[in-house]
Image (cartoon, rainbow, N blue to C red):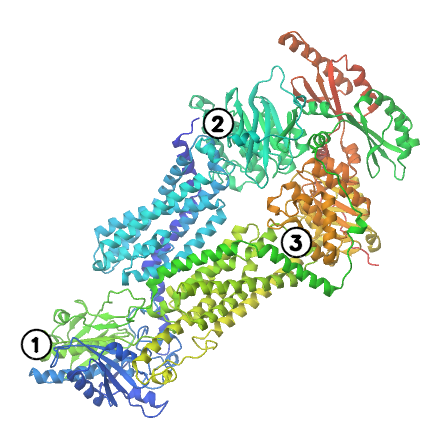
Amino acid sequence: MPASKGLLFKRYIRIELNLWRRTLFEIVALVIMVLVIFLNPIAHSKRLLYTTTENENEQSIVSHKLQDINILTRMADSKREKTKYILAFTPETTFTSEVTKNVAKTLELSSTVGYDSESEMQNQFDERTTLAGIVFNGLRDDGTPLTLSISIRFPSEFRTIAPFLTEDRLWITRCSGRINPGRDRAKHDKQQDIYIREGFLQLQHQIFVEWFHQLRKDIVSTYPEPNVEVYNILLKAADEPCSVMSVAQLPTFLYNFIYLLPFLNIIRNVAAQVEDGVMVHQWHYGYSFGMQWGIKFLVLFLRMCILGVIYTVMLLAFWAFGGREGEFSGTGTIAFVCFITLYTVEIIITGMVVAKLFANPTNAVLFALMLWLFMYAAFCIILERYWDIHKYYIFFILVAFCNCQMHFSMSLFRNCIEQPEMVNTIDFVLIFTSAISSALIYFLILLAIQWRMPGTFLSRRIVNNRPRKQQESDTTIMYLGRAPSFQNFEFGDVGSVELMRLRHVSTSHRDSERKILKNISMRVYRGEVFVILGHIGSGKLTLLRILAGLKFALRGNVYIMGNPFEPSGEARRLVDFRFDEHGLNKHLTVEQTIDYHVRLKLSPSESDRYEIERRKWLAILDQHVEGRGVRIGKLSSGSMKLVALCCCLAGDTPIIILEEPTTQLTGREAQIFWSIVHAEKENRAFIIATYNVGEAEHVADRIGILSMGVLEASGTPFFLRAKFSSSVDLVIIKKPHVPDQPITDYVNQFMQNIEPENEIGDSLTYRLPVIYRPRLQKLLIHLEIDRKMLGIENVRVVGAELSDIYMTLVTSFRLQQQMIPDVTQTFKYQVVSQKQLTKQRMRAMFYKKMIHTAPNVWPIIMIFTSFVLIAIIARLSVLLDMPKQRQNSIHIGFREPADVIKYIPNLKDCGYIDIRSVVKVNNKKSVDVSRTFDDDSFVCEKGSYRNDLRKKNELRSFGAVESDGDEHLNGYISQDMFHSAPMMLNLLQNVILRLSYPTQTDLVALVENHPLPTQLSQKINVLDNKIAHIHVPLVVGCIIPLTVSVFVIPLVEEEIYDVRFLQHMAGLGLKVFWGINLFWDWFTFFVYSIIIVVIMSLMGIGGFGFYENAIMVVLLTTFGLAALPLTYLVSMFVNKSIVRAFLVSVLLQGVSGLVLYIIYWDVANSNTIFFYAACMSPGFSLLDGVSNVYAQYLEQAICIEKCEAHDSCTEENMNEVVPNCKFDTFFKWAAPGILPPILYMVLSALIFLMLIFWIELHRREKKFHTSRDLRKMRTATYPFDDGDVADVKQKIAEADNTKAKQSVFLVDQVEARVPAAGKRIHTVSFALNKYMSMGIFGPRNSGKSHLMRQLVGQHGFAFGEIYVRGLDFKYDLESIHTYMGYSPQHRGLLNELTPREHIRLLCMIRGVPEAKIGEKMHDLCLMLNMTGWMHRKCSLLTAEKRHKLKIALALVAYNKVLVLDEPTCGMPATTRREIWNILRYIRYCGKTIIFATNDELECKILADFIILFQDSEMLAIGSLQYLRYKYSHGFYLEVRLIRDGATLAESEENLRKDVENLAKFVNFLHNRSELVGRLNNWFKFYVPVGHIVYSFLYGAMEKNKLRLNVSDYCIYQADMMSVVAQVQETRAQLKHHLVQTEGPLPLDTASPKKGRAKK
């Protein structure tokens, strides 16, 4: 097999080239994010928030002498009595005491207070009475220090202004020193800088003056002490972005998501291959899984390298030429390139793991997105703190998931350039070790998953080539039932070529019930279509897996062309298969797919055939698919199946194995599919599994009937008919109201003891033993003579139906006796009052919750997961503990004494010193507003600063120092640039020192603005506050989405399995359903909340006491009231997959909770507008409330510590002694109260609940409405339509309300769906009364199920009307549902409930008295033989038992109408007979039955009349025999000739002569007879006789049987599928004829639908 690596590599390259749009989008997104990171346009635009039109053009200069704090005292005096502040200082020495005493005297302060330490001073600082605290650093033991280094500590908030925004009220986050009267609420001295208004600058200067005075006493200076005056300059500053509002965290935020889109696309790409079985099929073709993963990795790596190169080049370009500070590092560059390469490897492997784990692309992408966002939200703050404390716990974070590494690495490599002194070797070791470890861990996980789940239908033993060894226990596996006789099997003819053989194969496979293949032996011959026919659960799929080499047999052998079949050997090239998965890559085109399979299957020596094969299959597909250039994923399911079939057939693969190939195909697509199969079967063998008898009869050359793991018989259809048919059916269609007994007596005159086998409507069916076939001609002749006398309209003789033979063969010998109780007694229930019924339905909902939701294991799993998450986060959140010393200092001016001499110019040489630039201090605080000097900060300018200022329109300097003679120094500060005032003053003071002591280089003045810590309850983006507000919410935010999303599982399960609709149909209203759901789930969530809080307490999260924990429970419970309706909304829109709904719910709850909260702190910088907008999310409100509780708890701890420092402080008077320590209840509106979060959550709950009910009501209303104008619509009854259909539609449309009420079920021109364009609508009309049963017959995917859902109200209709017992479907649906029972085709049961629980639940909702439920359950068990498995969960039941249970649920009440969708589809014969007997008896008791089916036998047994249905169109209506008589022309004649001859050549010659004689005879019957099938000596002819004279036909066959050397023969008519095809063909011919003769048909050929007259 030429499964070369190059071919697979080219295939994957083609896939990536076809996905070039995704790659281009990834590149564009990456470039945009990188540009935003480095250019940061938002940062430059934020400063607009701080400019107003009223002062934008204001220009002024205002002076201040720095000798008083009158502005501050005047502002304070306006609120209370005369204020005298004290001045605190530390340490308490002679020098500090004297300096502060003089300063207090100058500034008119009341007194000074000294402390031994800074912490003591901070703990006892009272901002109500204390101006500021002074910390003197670097003091000598005695005397005046040569270096004045002070830290001035003011309260964190300004005293003279009160802006609305918190960041404008704090020293650490204020953006501008200019006063805006409106925003800052300032009335006086608007032109003074905040530093002057608050008194900071005065205090800074007076401390320097007092120190300078003492210094002059110790060191004499000839330079006179100058007078200092400061001028506030109000002039628009140049573009200086505000440090706080610059969205400083935006680059970090985007770094986390740089590779998110490529990661998701990798998952989509790989998961699509896993989902569609591509990898399993490629393994079958010879590519090992390791090779596939390796080559796929290589191709993805090449694609990701494009992104990596672009990303690397852009970053290096910005770092090298972007004007950033620091030196470009070669080592850092090499390390960065290596990391990007390693990160690319890691992200590809991680994506492969996620894709393999989930398989479904959508689910995999949702999980990956959820994981990515949660890892960002949970660990971004921890990673941010690494550079402060260098804790190596983050290694586990970096290993856990790859997205955290990008954030960390970007900080690392940026520091390599900007701050190389901060980077250690261990930091590089950390990032590279974690990346390598993560890649290895995920690689091992991928290996483990691949070993555990190699692929759908593929056994691990096959992949590893380890057959199961024979064990002693295997000998006990034997079949104890009825063993089929060897005579049940027909073997190939003399000239047949055997391709595959099974010998005594037995095997078992894991499933809900024990299903074993028992001693299977069969042969498959070339040129045949071998159909394995069996019910669902008979073992067909297991048998196909063994034949395809996907599973080892437990015992027995499989041979291909006489050699043992080795699944791992070259024999695999002889077999190809297609099961439920099509095995095609969705991203390749049709042409590329065919090209790949042709190249793959042709050996190198057959290269000349490549182009022929390729053109052949493309030519076939061009006729039936959308186009050869269309991607596989864009094709319809039918086109996909055709492409998959052609891929199987490419390269002359001899054995093709297909499992239910036409399940998803329409009738027309199925015809095309089988036409290709029959055209290509000459040199091949097809093995096809199906449960559809009609399909098997239509396509099979040989049929193997499989039942309960036993091959009951095998042979050609003719062999099965001849072998197992002991009778022929005489069908007599009598006139209405003609009794059947005279006809029966007449038949018994010729054949004794004959009774009607079946009587449906006007059809009588007599089963005549085959021994009476010679007498049949005489009977038929007399019936034709006396037909008028007997009241007979038509007589037919039908040969053995294959469905009858199948039913006979597979009927279990263990068939139990069926007891059908009296319907009129057992199904009636007492009529109770509406109030009692509502109470019982509420009890039913509680009962369902107890049996379905309460035992659910998912909550336990989520609680355990929560415990693990809490433990992990508790360990990692050590990094988020509140630091003992809260550092938020602002460094001003010079930082080191040496900087003064190095940087400062000589003022004597200048007109003034201009401060042109400053640098930020290199720290990692969340807000960095420090301003210090470097060698580029000062410019020595000539001339006058004021004169130069007049020439400027904007201010580009931070300030200036100018000499005004020898005794005056002037300082200029820019109010637009905050912190320029103390910075300029620090320069001015050091200039004074240089002028006074030019030779003394050790005399320096240093200053630091170190505001007191902010209150932790304040929501401001300072590291301390951020930690206080994030620590506990981080834990809660990770747990809650998982916990609350569990509640979506039962709701989505009910939606998926249609149980929600069945409950609604039984009478369960919206109020009861949603009300009980919310009540139960809310109570359950309350219990979970208590458990979570207890776990958090045990793990030490938060350290709360009982009161705080109770508040946490209140918050969590309130959150549940809002989050549960949000989860319900998810279940209403994402209800196709439980996993997908759970992931969407977790993602939604997480994004609206933790992720949004982290973005609020990390990106939005605690913006107030963002906060109030986000509060509408219940998750955000919960975390905000939790953070308030934790922040106040921390503040209480701080206040208690401060209180302990006061001797007179107690808990009772703490709020009086210690400032800002008045704590009251949490239930308040002001921060940090929890009433606002509770209010927002309750408001969200009300909004979500109203939205739920609005959606429910809107959907109900939308069912019966459409946006199109129905007045222009016309029902599609045309001249070429069936006359009976037109008559029925017209008759029903003209009926008035009185006539409508006479019918039990009346459907008047109901459309399948309103078309998007055009005016023609295909509609259905029929009317049913009591004692009637109607079948809707059509091929698969013809629209039957949709029509059935319309008939029960699950799907709506806009055009047409339905009346049930006189009630209008659109307005009285709830009342109508009380008369109806419904059994859906595939769903209708909950896996975790038992049959007993299902029946009890529905009985309670229906209103059956609870005392009578046991009696009813007993009757249903006896009726359907359900007694032995009523206690077992439905997930453990076989399909037949689940079908029985659905029928039982449809019969729990006194239903007048039963609507059944495929009631016995794929069921064993025993079950089918049981259900048919029940339905026939119910019909006999006066009920009306409507069922959909594609089984002709089911219609024959149950239906009074049927509707032929195809493509949602009503083709014909009438009884089965009537439609067959009307549309089925001719008959099929199957003949088997006798082979005779001494040698093979003689036998062939005799057979040739017999064939010629047989052809002449058949041509005698009709000159257009056609040979439609032949297999050796078996022949199938179609004889298109217009009117069949059965007496002549059977007489001719009996007389010529010996002459023609006929072994046996069989005569039968076309099946109903052929009738449907014939109807469509007839319609098409008539339409074509009308178009040719009369031109194009108008759209409106029928009269508009008439409204029903009301009487």
* Image quarter in which the C terminus is found: bottom right
Q: Is residue 67 above or below residue 387?
A: below
Q: Check disc 3 and report the residue beneath it.
A: 1061
Which residue matches tag 1?
Answer: 998
Q: Which residue is nearer to you in this view: 11 or 1240?
A: 1240
Q: Specify the amino acid type for callout 1.
A: Pro
Would residue 394 be found to the left or right of residue 1345 on screen? left
When asked about the image quadrant of residue 223, the answer is bottom left
Q: Residue at x 48, y 34 (%)?
A: 281
Which part of the image, by quadrant, shows the N terminus? Answer: top left
At label 2, the amino acid type is Arg
Residue 1588, above or below 1183: above
| Distance from the alpha carbon under mark 3 to that under mark 1 | 94 Å
Comparing 1632 with 42, the one in front is: 42
Instruction: Indicate which disc, 3 or 2, sits on the residue closer to the N terminus.
Output: 2
- Between discs 3 and 1, the one toward the N terminus: 1
Left or right placement of residue 788 versus residue 1054 in this view:
right
Alpha carbon of mark 3 to alpha carbon of mark 2: how far? 47 Å
Give the secondary structure at mark 2.
helix
**Residue at 6% across, 83% down:** 220
User: Disc 2 designates what residue?
Assistant: 572
Contact between labelled residues 1 and 3, with CB atoms less than 8 Å apart? no
SS at mark 1 in the image: loop
